[in-house]
């Protein structure tokens, strides 16, 4: 059981990181990006394709992360350029069209041949009691925590961070304060795209996903985001890890094991019904 | 004005699409009237998430070879290979087009994620046979008018169960069934058959992991069950991932690991080698393609000339085309859909040197004619054959 | 009687089935405003039900199976719709995506009945004949579309369009928002479910690949591209689903481009923001049809025939507000407000910005959780009543920002405001405000006329008290004075009392007989219009806020 939970935590770290990127993007740019997982997947798969071609792991990983960042930047540019005045729903539909396009491209580029998905971080094992733990697990959880801590510190204590906070309240108000919201939005897209690729690299060696399944990590990541009410990064991080752990544990519970993939949906449904239970009316007045 | 133009454009494009469809349809049926070629079709996933382009390509290579030597009864073969993009709607469209519009006499060399399920009923209704190059779905082995030339995952899994009991002499045999839609029951059935035949009890059956997800939970379960041999079902990438997870749990030596034929590829051995997870046993549904068995030389020559990858999958496409050619050659009289179907159902069956047994379709309601297989093992030098033909009781 | 090849029969059947799917998106996304990423999951449920029921009852007729599938998906859709009625917008899209992945997983695990044994589902005669099956699919599509068109004209259907534009306004019109949303979602699910039933009949065996979340997304993109909220758009979506892969194949292009092409098309349609292809076309036709029609309410004073005399006014139906206090998280908005609106006159509520005027209307009409104090309409205590109940009881309102529903025509809007007890009422109201042609789509009206239409709407269904929030906003000075005089006539003509919130003091002078002044949530003055407006405190309050 404990081993299954630990195995689940690695995938959970992917949920957490993509969840954090989703939430931050949503706060800073007002876009709920359904294609965030696919952007990360594109980066990770590019990296692994380069490794398969013989590139050194470090370089390939770096290139993969940069590719995902640029892809995120591009999607962000398209959204800010063409859809600045659109409603959040229209922008969300746009990200769905992006997801369709990325999946098509991903299938085409990374078809079916087995992709060697080596650990980006050298892997060793150590035993805690009777449980075997890999450095990958430790690194995955540690990195997730570090990312969350850094982002929180950055938002709370840096000038740039406070600009982002101002922007998350209102773009127009931020512009009046002389903040270049376009630049900040696009930087967020770039950075968060890179983060999603990191999530892909963390998860892939254990999970060995297909392009589609890595792209659809966005669903449990959304569940984590929903747990944090699309606000609280800490809850999102813990939520992501927890969902992973519960799924891992669920694998060993007979009645649940086959359907544990439904857990994110149940979490989304129950959390949203609970959060919105008093929201009888739509937008204010 | 701009908008008017745009709407007009859309309307005219739509109209053009429609008209072009109609027009070329007519020109095709014009070809049909000449009745010179023997039309054979294939519906395969050439694009999409899990493409199998080499299977119909191998069949095409065979038909080209036959055409180069003059065709059959002086008639050339016209092979129409359709892509379904793993989309059932497109597969249905392609299947109906081939049967209704093109009027194929049979299908051969198909390898699709969705063809058997979507078109199986339709093939039955139209009494057209499909000699599937690679039967991917479970349905391929359950339809009256589909005869796959491969073992299929279920049969191959059964062979591996037998191999672990007879050749490996394992006491605790375990099964990890990575679930694939609609196949779990079939796996459970071959497991209980095996239990009956060998008077043994399976030590563990794990169905908790979906094919393509992290297999670690199932691997950990086999640790607790103290397995001597673990048989799992997987496609090529999942096999590599599975073995990587086994290695990560430091369990490579704790039991023998066996998987079905999809992992028997050049790229898989490369990956297994690189990730230090050798030792995996894999089934081979045909004469193992990595050996220098003389039966393979003609196959190697044909496919190399046609620039088709030399894989186990491409043997499937190749064999299905050869079997169909043999069947058509056996016809005395006009070559029609009816006569081809009848010839394929011949109680004599057909022999092919790449198969371990006679390929007999007959009149049954479901077909799995090729149940013979061999086992190869991943070693540092490549795939090594470790068994003779295994025949199912 | 083979009139086209059976291949084309298949394609035409597929067009009908795809059109059904697109139509369900058109209803749920286009009409109701919910982004659904799970329409194919409902189709999967419909298909599963057909395969499962027929496996157990082989003799059952296909038509009956379609209805069983439709009923089951209606139920599932209604439950999901009802459970998620407070979840909106993008969050609801997340729920539907979650549902789609969960259903995808379920069918990956379970498979469809018959798939593992190869026992296909073949509809019983006569529907095993592809031609008859094709006819059935088109008859079903056209019947369903006809029913949907009729449904869209019922109050429930009109209400769904109202909900998309604003839930608050819909509730104020007396619409049961939660029920209508769930019902609309369920109808969408039903259409998809029947499409799934037809898929089962068409393919014999169903593959879970048909119903993946990606497939649902592509259907959504196609529906957005073609504008599937109307039948022609849905048919175009069906045609695209068949003809685009066919064209790609003929051009020798890879078929996986299909989804990407639809995505790009949807992207472009959303970028232009004018609706899908068919919707644009319909809008253009409408524009053309009403090119020369009057699109404004040209208010005329005149002297309308007295339709209703003051004695019809039931004086006891007055609105009594007693000690009303409202606080939002320690922020006191209204403090012990007392106010009476009689049914015989126009009462103006004025005060500086932030005085709590709109909050008062919200509290009276039921939009504020549970305010302290008492409110009565005649003898009826309002506190326990929902927005809808208050509206149906005769308490009507308009909003500060116009909430007229662009998707409807004037006639439909007036119908939606309530079944008139007096069948001539709509006509009287129309003449009173000089409304344009009944068939005119509201989207073609100018802003000021939309506001007048909203006021007109409150009068249809025997109102007792109407509350108008800044009725003159957006009108020029001349028109607003005419409107003021019109409003002044309403109590006489229609026998109901009026409370107006207005900044334009001239408007108040012309319209109102009585004025209450709010400042900081408290009543600072009350009385005759002219007297009160000259009150020192009132001038002070206004000037004070004006300077700040």
Image (tube, coloured by chain):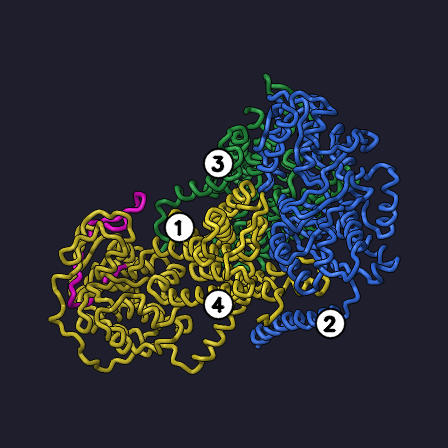
Q: Quadrant of the C terminus of chain A?
A: bottom left
The reply to whether the magenta stretch includes residue A69 is no
In front: label 2 or label 1? 2
Of callouts 4 and 1, the N-terminal one = 1
Provide the secondary structure element on which disc 3 rests: helix
Main secondary-structure element of the magenta-colored stretch: strand
Report how far apart the C-alphas of labels 2 and 3 lie in the structure.
67 Å
* Residue at position x 77%, y 70% in the image: B34
Within 10 angstroms of label 4, few (less than 14), some, or many (20 or more) residues? Answer: many
Q: Which residues are magenta?
A: C325-351
Q: Do the residues under discs 2 and 4 have CB atoms within 8 angstroms? A: no
In front: label 3 or label 4? 4
Residue C75, numbered label? 1
Give the residue number, with chain letter if any, for mark 2.
B30
Chain letter of mark 1 equals: C
Report how far apart the C-alphas of labels 1 and 3 lie in the structure.
35 Å
Within 10 angstroms of label 2, few (less than 14), some, or many (20 or more) residues? Answer: few
**Chain B colour as displayed:** blue
Q: Quadrant of the N terminus of chain A?
A: top right
Residue C231, numbered label? 4
Q: Is residue C99 above or below residue B103?
A: above
Q: Are discs 4 and 1 both within one chain?
A: yes
């Amino acid at each position: 059981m404990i081993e299954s939970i630990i195995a689940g935590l690695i995938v959970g770290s992917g949920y957490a990181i993509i969840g954090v990127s989703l939430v931050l993007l949503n706060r800073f740019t007002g876009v709920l990006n359904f294609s965030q997982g696919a952007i990360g997947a594109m980066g990770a798969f590019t990296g692994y394709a380069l490794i398969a071609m013989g590139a050194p792991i470090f370089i390939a990983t770096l290139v993969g992360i940069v590719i995902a960042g640029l892809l995120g930047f591009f999607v962000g540019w398209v959204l800010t350029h063409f859809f600045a005045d659109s409603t959040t729903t229209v922008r969300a539909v746009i990200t769905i069209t992006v997801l369709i396009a990325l999946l098509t491209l991903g299938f085409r580029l990374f078809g079916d041949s087995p992709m060697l998905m080596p650990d980006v971080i050298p892997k060793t094992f150590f035993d805690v009691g009777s449980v075997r733990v890999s450095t990958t697990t430790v690194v995955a959880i540690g990195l997730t925590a570090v990312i969350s801590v850094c982002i929180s510190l950055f938002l709370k204590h840096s000038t740039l961070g406070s600009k982002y906070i101002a922007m998350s309240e209102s773009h127009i108000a931020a512009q009046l304060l002389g903040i270049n919201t376009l630049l900040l939005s696009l930087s967020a897209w770039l950075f968060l795209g890179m983060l999603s690729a990191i999530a892909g690299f963390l998860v892939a060696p254990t999970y060995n996903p297909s392009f589609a399944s890595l792209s659809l990590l966005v669903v449990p990541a959304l569940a984590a985001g929903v747990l944090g009410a699309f606000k609280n990064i800490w809850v999102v991080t813990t939520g992501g890890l927890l969902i992973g752990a519960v799924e891992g544990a669920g694998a060993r519970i007979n009645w649940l094991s086959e359907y544990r993939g439904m857990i994110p949906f149940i979490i989304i449904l129950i959390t949203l019904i609970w959060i919105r239970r008093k929201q009888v009316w739509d937008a204010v007045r | 004005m701009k908008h008017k133009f745009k709407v007009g454009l859309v309307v005219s494009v739509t109209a053009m699409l429609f008209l072009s469809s109609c027009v070329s349809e007519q020109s095709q049926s014009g070809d049909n009237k000449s009745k010179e070629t023997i039309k054979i079709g294939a519906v395969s996933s050439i694009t999409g998430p899990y493409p199998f382009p080499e299977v119909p390509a191998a069949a095409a290579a065979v038909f080209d070879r036959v055409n180069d030597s003059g065709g059959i009864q002086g008639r050339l073969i016209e092979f129409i290979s359709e892509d379904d993009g793993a989309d059932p709607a497109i597969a249905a469209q392609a299947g109906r087009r081939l049967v209704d519009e093109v009027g194929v006499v049979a299908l051969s060399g198909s390898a699709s994620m969705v063809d058997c399920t979507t078109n199986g009923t339709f093939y039955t209704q139209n009494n057209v046979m499909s000699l599937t190059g690679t039967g991917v779905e479970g349905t391929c082995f359950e339809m009256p008018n589909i005869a796959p030339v491969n073992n299929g995952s279920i049969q191959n899994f059964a062979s591996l169960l037998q191999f672990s009991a007879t050749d490996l002499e394992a006491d605790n045999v375990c099964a990890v069934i990575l679930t694939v839609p609609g196949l779990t029951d079939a796996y459970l059935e071959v497991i209980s058959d095996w239990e009956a035949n060998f008077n043994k009890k399976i030590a563990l059956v794990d169905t908790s992991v979906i094919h393509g997800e992290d297999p670690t939970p199932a691997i950990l379960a086999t640790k607790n069950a103290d397995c001597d041999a673990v048989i799992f079902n997987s496609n090529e990438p999942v096999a590599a991932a599975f073995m990587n997870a086994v290695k990560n749990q430091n369990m490579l030596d704790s039991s023998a690991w066996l998987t079905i034929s999809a992992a028997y590829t050049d790229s898989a051995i490369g990956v297994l080698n690189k990730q230090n997870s050798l030792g995996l046993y894999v089934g081979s549904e045909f004469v193992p393609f990595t050996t220098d068995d003389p039966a393979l030389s003609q196959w190697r020559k044909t496919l190399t000339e046609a620039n088709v990858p030399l894989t186990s999958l491409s043997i499937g496409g190749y064999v299905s085309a050869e079997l169909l050619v043999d069947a058509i050659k056996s016809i005395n009289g006009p070559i029609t859909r009816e006569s081809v179907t009848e010839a394929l159902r011949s109680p004599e069956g057909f022999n092919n040197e790449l198969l371990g047994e006679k390929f007999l379709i007959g009149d049954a309601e479901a077909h799995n004619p090729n149940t013979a297989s061999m086992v190869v093992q991943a070693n540092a030098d490549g795939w090594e054959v470790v068994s003779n033909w295994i025949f199912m009781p | 009687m083979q009139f086209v090849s059976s291949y084309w029969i298949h394609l035409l059947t597929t067009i009908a089935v795809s059109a059904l799917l697109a139509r369900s998106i058109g209803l749920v996304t286009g009409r109701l405003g919910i982004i659904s990423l799970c329409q194919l999951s409902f189709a999967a449920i419909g298909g599963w039900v057909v395969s499962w029921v027929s496996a157990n009852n082989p003799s059952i007729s296909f038509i009956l199976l379609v209805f069983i599938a439709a009923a089951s998906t209606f139920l599932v859709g209604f439950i999901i719709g009802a459970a998620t009625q407070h979840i909106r917008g993008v969050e609801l899209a997340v729920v539907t995506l979650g549902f789609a992945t969960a259903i995808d997983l379920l069918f990956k695990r379970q498979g469809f009945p018959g798939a593992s044994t190869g026992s296909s589902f073949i509809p019983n005669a006569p529907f095993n004949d592809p031609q008859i099956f094709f006819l059935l699919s088109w008859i079903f599509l056209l019947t369903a579309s006809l029913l949907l068109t009729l449904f869209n004209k019922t109050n429930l259907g009109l209400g769904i369009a109202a909900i998309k534009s604003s839930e608050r306004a819909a509730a104020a019109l007396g619409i049961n928002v939660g029920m209508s949303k769930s019902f609309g979602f369920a109808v969408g699910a039903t259409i998809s479910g029947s499409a799934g039933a037809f898929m089962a009949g068409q393919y014999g065996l169903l593959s879970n690949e048909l119903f993946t979340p990606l497939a649902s997304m592509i259907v959504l993109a196609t529906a957005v591209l073609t504008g599937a909220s109307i039948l022609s758009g849905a048919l175009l979506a069906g045609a695209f689903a068949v003809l685009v892969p066919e064209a790609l194949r003929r051009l020798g292009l890879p078929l996986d481009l299909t989804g990407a092409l639809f995505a790009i098309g949807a992207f472009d349609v959303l970028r232009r923001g004018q609706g899908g292809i068919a919707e644009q076309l319909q809008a253009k036709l409408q524009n053309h049809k009403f090119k020369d029609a009057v699109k404004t309410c040209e208010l005329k004073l005149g002297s309308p025939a007295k339709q209703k005399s003051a004695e019809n006014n039931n004086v006891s139906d007055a609105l009594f507000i007693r000690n009303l206090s409202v606080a939002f998280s320690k922020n006191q908005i209204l403090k012990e407000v007392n106010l009476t609106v009689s049914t015989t006159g126009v009462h103006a509520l004025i005060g500086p910005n932030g005085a709590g005027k709109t909050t008062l209307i919200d509290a009276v009409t039921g939009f504020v959780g549970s305010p302290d104090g008492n409110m009565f309409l005649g003898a009826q205590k309002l506190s326990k009543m929902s927005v809808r109940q208050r509206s149906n009881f005769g308490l009507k309102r308009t909003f500060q920002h116009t909430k007229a529903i662009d998707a409807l025509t004037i006639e439909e809007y007036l119908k939606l405001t309530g079944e008139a007890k007096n069948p001539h009422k709509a006509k009287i109201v129309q003449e009173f405000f000089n409304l344009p042609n009944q068939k005119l789509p509201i989207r073609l009206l100018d802003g000021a006329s939309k506001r007048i239409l909203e006021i007109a709407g409150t009068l249809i269904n025997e109102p007792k008290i109407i509350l108008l929030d800044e009725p003159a906003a957006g009108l020029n000075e001349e028109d607003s004075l005419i409107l003021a005089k019109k409003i002044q006539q309403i109590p006489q003509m229609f026998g109901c009392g009026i409370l107006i919130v207005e900044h334009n003091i001239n408007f108040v002078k012309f319209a109102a007989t009585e004025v209450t002044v709010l400042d900081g949530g408290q009543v600072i003055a009350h009385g005759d219009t002219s007297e009160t407006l000259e009150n020192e405190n009132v001038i002070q309050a206004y000037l004070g806020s004006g300077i700040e």
